[in-house]
Amino acid sequence: MMNKNTVLSWATLIMIIVGLGLIALGLIKYREVSAWGFGAVGGGFFAIAWVFNALKGRV
């Protein structure tokens, strides 16, 4: 059975992976078109993952 802390841990891990993927897309594939946008959205995913990690012991 998964409790709330386990769910938040998995959500944090998934958000970090998606954030890294978006930043990599911006740096590698779409450098001349929309790299700043992909980087900003990837940074937003990191911020949300940080919040999920901070909530892990409090929920």
Image: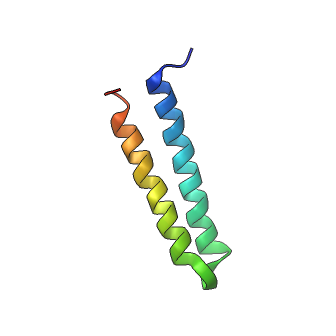
25 over 58 or under it: above or below: below
Q: Name which residue lies at 38% across and 31% down.
A: 56
Q: Is residue 33 left or right of residue 49?
A: right
21 over 40 or under it: above or below: above
Q: Position of residue 57 (x, y in %)?
A: 33, 27
The part of the image, by quadrant, that contains residue 34 is bottom right
Q: Name which residue lies at 55% across and 65% down.
A: 23
Q: Is residue 6 left or right of residue 58?
A: right
Q: Nearer the viewer, residue 23 or 58?
A: 58
The part of the image, by quadrant, that contains residue 2 is top right
34 over 3 or under it: above or below: below
| Number of numbered markers | 0
In this view, the residue farthest toward the top is 1
Q: Is residue 41 left or right of residue 52?
A: right
Name the image quarter holding the C terminus: top left
Q: Name which residue lies at 58% across and 53% down.
A: 18
Q: Position of residue 14 (x, y in %)?
A: 57, 43
Name the image quarter holding the N terminus: top right
Q: Name which residue lies at 48% across and 19% down.
A: 3
In this view, the residue farthest toward the bottom is 32
Q: Position of residue 49 (x, y in %)?
A: 44, 46
In this view, the residue farthest toward the left is 58
Q: How is the image coloured?
A: rainbow
Q: Position of residue 54 (x, y in %)?
A: 33, 38
